[in-house]
Image: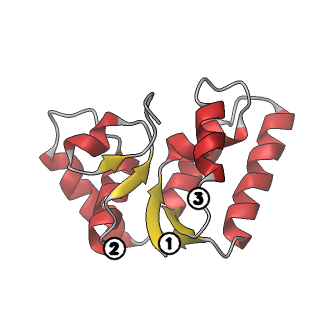
């Protein structure tokens, strides 16, 4: 079974039909049979935070999505740890010239640790670190 990492970008676009990337993400999602998705609690935190000011209906949909991700046998969620925080901080500090978010740094470290090379995102920062981004205009 293939394993890929899901960035916040993917979950944000997946749940919001008004997102510019929603249709593209939906198409890609339908092609993910026999694929194990890995994400982190930090990603889910970032997703919930992103939709914090979108009103009650969107917030409810986001909570439902997060609960379904948690319950999905096809998604592995890597728990937050003090070690992942510290390692993320080291990468963040070492990339001060980049626009990486702290969550990106934790995600990149998680991907390296698990040997995952492909990521469901459009974020060029992952490509800058040598990962293959799976969401682009050519898909």
* Marks 2/1: CA–CA distance: 13 Å
Which residue occupies the foreground of this view, 50 or 35? 35
Q: How many marks?
A: 3
Sequence order check, earlier mark of 2 and 1: 1
Mark 2: secondary structure: helix
Tell me what residue is drawn at x 42 percent, y 36 percent.
Answer: 122
Tell me what residue is drawn at x 51 percent, y 53 percent.
Answer: 43
Q: Is residue 122 left or right of residue 49?
A: left
Give neighbour class at mark 3: few <14, some 14-19, many 20+ (Cα, 10 Å): some
Tell me what residue is drawn at x 45 percent, y 68 percent.
Answer: 3
Q: Are marks 2 and 3 in contact (CB under 8 Å)?
A: no
Which residue occupies the foreground of this view, 134 or 83? 134
What numbered label is drawn on residue 114? 2
Sequence order check, earlier mark of 2 and 3: 3
In this rendering, the label closer to the viewer, 2 or 1: 2
Tell me what residue is drawn at x 57 percent, y 52 percent.
Answer: 45
Q: Are marks 2 and 1 in contact (CB under 8 Å)?
A: no
Give neighbour class at mark 1: few <14, some 14-19, many 20+ (Cα, 10 Å): few
Q: Position of residue 96 (x, y in %)?
A: 16, 38
Q: Are marks 1 and 3 in contact (CB under 8 Å)?
A: no
Q: Is residue 131 left or right of residue 54?
A: left
Mark 1: secondary structure: loop
Q: Which residue is mark 1?
A: 79
Q: Is residue 135 left or right of residue 66?
A: left
Mark 3: secondary structure: loop
* Marks 2/3: CA–CA distance: 19 Å
Q: Position of residue 2 (x, y in %)?
A: 46, 70
Q: Position of residue 109 (x, y in %)?
A: 29, 62
Q: Which residue is mark 3?
A: 32
In this rendering, the label closer to the viewer, 1 or 3: 3
Q: Position of residue 16 (x, y in %)?
A: 71, 34
Which residue occupies the foreground of this view, 17 or 134? 134
């Amino acid at each position: 079974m293939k394993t890929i990492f899901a960035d916040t970008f993917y979950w944000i676009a997946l749940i919001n039909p008004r997102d510019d990337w929603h249709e593209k993400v939906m198409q890609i999602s339908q092609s993910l049979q026999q694929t194990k998705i890995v994400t982190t609690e930090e990603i889910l935190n970032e997703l919930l935070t992103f939709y914090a000011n979108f009103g009650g209906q969107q917030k409810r949909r986001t909570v439902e999505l997060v609960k379904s991700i948690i319950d999905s046998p096809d998604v592995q969620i890597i728990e937050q740890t003090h070690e992942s925080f510290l390692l993320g901080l080291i990468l963040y500090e070492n990339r001060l010239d980049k626009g990486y978010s702290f969550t990106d740094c934790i995600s990149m470290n998680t991907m390296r640790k698990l040997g995952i090379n492909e990521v469901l995102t459009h974020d060029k920062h992952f490509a800058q670190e040598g990962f293959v981004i799976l969401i682009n205009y050519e898909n």
